[in-house]
Amino acid sequence: MFFILAQTSVPKLHDVKIDGHLEEIWDSALTFTDFKQQSPSLGEEAVYPTEARIFYTDRGLYVAFVCKGKKPVLQRGSRGELSPDKVTFSLDPYGGDGKKYYFFSADPFGNRADAEVNSGIFNGEWDTEWKAAGSLTSDGYVVEMMIPFKAFRYRRGVVWGVAFSRWTSDGYQMRFPLNRRGVYPDMHPVRLNPPLSWALSLMPYATYRRDSLQDFRTGEYAFQSRIYGGGDARFTVEDNFLHLTVKPDFADVESDPYYINVGRYRYFLTERRPFFTYDDELFRPNFNEFLPYTMLVYTRNIGSDMYGNEIPITYGIKGGVSLWGTSLAFMGVRTDSGQDWHLFRGNYKGKYLSVGTFLGRYMGYYSLPDPFNPDRFVKVADTNVMADVDVAFNYGYFQGGFALLHADYYDALAGWKSGWVKNWGLGYRSPYWVVGFSYSEVDSLFYAERITFMPYAASKDMLFRVGRKFYKFHGLNYLSLGALAFMGKEAGEPFSKGIGGTINIGFGKGHSIFMGTDFGEQYEYDPSRDTLVRFYGKRLFLYSSFNLQANYLRLEFSTGDLYNYATGKLGTYSRAYFGLPWRISQFLNVSNGLSVWSYPGMPSTFRNILRLTLSLGNVATARMGWEKVLQREDALAGIYDRAWIFLSFERGLTGLYISLNTKLLPDDSLNVNPLSYHRADYIFGVKLKGYLRL
């Protein structure tokens, strides 16, 4: 079933003060009142009356929510955690089809959060400047938002899409329009005539760091202290931008988490540096629920060597333009050691069809021990070139597409290598049914590690799944059942194959439980030992979330068979996680996550992460965290501790940010000696960052 929403015009009025109190002008705004339950019961009548209003001026968009029927849970701050009683305005200024959009969330106490979303991938690192304020009423609350046109990119002359959501602490989400499409959410089409907008953002910074750097010749660490500066400059004109960075680093972002790599391939680490996270959706492939996602650019390769030591980035430049519905983006980065990345991406996104292409080139070298001088290293030149074509379609509830990647790698010692990655898929997804098939194939000679995240080499994987969801089922909010069949193969191995099933239930006010299992015949090849391992694999997993007085308690558990490449052992693994956030007061929030895992051939490992958010009115926010990892053998022995503190002070469009953190830089390549994972590299940094938008 398809829902066609008539276009409406957003009125152009005049600017008002954002203070949480609605002036008379809001009576002339475009108003929406037909909110329905998005969850826990899709399509049911809204539990609490909700109203959304919108208009615009030459400066930006004005949005207001009038929320009745429930008093909010108290929580104050500026950029801290939002109250569970909150509202969200979603905006697609690129055609209204929901493929790419922004969302802006706020609560009645002035807390704000924003993100950009591309094909269902949320980029929470995206951060822009806008205003929000709220006030309590006799039976609820009011929230006002003002989003300047300079705060986001957009296209003029096309239909925009908008959506409004309200969350409550007792587990309800109300939305207009109701989202039945999933990854490309339903939007209400609107017309407006925004001005030609431009923005210049200057973000200089100064940093003091004390690093413990590893000498890869000896494996020992030496301390180094330094003070340096750099910054970012960003210029945007509607949907076009140019971004320049000088000396970006990790000093102002949270440390990487501890991990144990038990697989054949390196561990994936999340990118956090603003230069790379901002507009990163322009370098992602087209994909959907049935077309497997294949990463094009893994920017954590840039600025770090294979030992986890930092290689300073000299400069980076990134830009993008939008022409006739097609986005063109480029990025160039150079490090102090002479490595160069040049990346180009073109992508057309139509109403039903998206077609993209990518070309990337890396030129540099790697160090190799000199066989004639053991204390010296020689530089070996290498080059990586990768090209991609990806096509995805989304027609109503039908989705699918294909992607082809080709890579050429040159090594001055070994010559040229090349290979392919081939993905395709087709399926049907509605609020009630899901049926689909996916296929992925990676050549044995595919080598693009300098540009992308290395996929499984010489592998073929197929997956078929079917599922049915029932709403208001015998007192439950919903009941979802699923089944899957999979088959995989790596070079020189027989086919691995298996089947599985899932069950997902929702009940009460925000409670949910998801359970699943799969089992089959597995073949694993250990290249370092030239060994083929055959075993009957099985896995059981459980994920649950419970709403306890507006605090969501998370419980996760999984167990099954695993071949541990780090130890060469085959056996049973187990992982468990317990997470609990809690509001201590209006200004203080604490969350704690405790996890334990056990892999074959390794002692049990425990991790505890404690996070604290302290908000001082609407001016300052402090986020603090501490992580401790332990292994239990004969006694408890600490592997490492890390801690981080972020302080932010905001006033209007300027801010001061200070961060201090110990930095973990683990080796993200596989090492069969598990003792190597005990190593930690610490960075102590202080960063003062001023933000100015003209």
Image: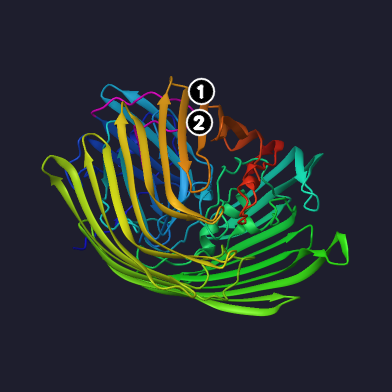
Task: Name which residue lies at 56% across and 68% down.
Answer: 530
Foreground of the two, 284 or 198: 284
Q: Is residue 246 shown left or right of residue 81?
A: right
For label 2, count other residues whose C-alpha is less than 10 Å away and answer few (under 14), some (14-19) or many (20+).
Answer: many
Relative horizontal placement of residue 506, taking residue 18 as reference (left or right): left
Is residue 655 shown left or right of residue 605? right
User: Is residue 70 on the magenta stretch?
Assistant: yes
Where 41 falls versus 290 (above or below)?
above
From the image, tell me which residue sits under label 2.
78
Residue at horizontal 41%, vertical 39%?
576
Q: Residue at x 50, y 41 (%)?
A: 130
Is residue 357 magenta-colored? no
Question: Residue 67, percent across and down?
Answer: 29, 33
Residue type marked 2: Ser
The residues colored magenta run 69-88
Q: How is the image coloured?
A: rainbow
Q: Mark 1 belongs to which amino acid?
A: Gly
Could you classify mark 1 by the number of other residues whose Cα lies within 10 Å: few (under 14), some (14-19), or many (20 or more)?
some
Q: How far across and how far down the image is residue 421, in percent?
A: 50, 74
Viewer-proximal residue among 522 and 453: 522
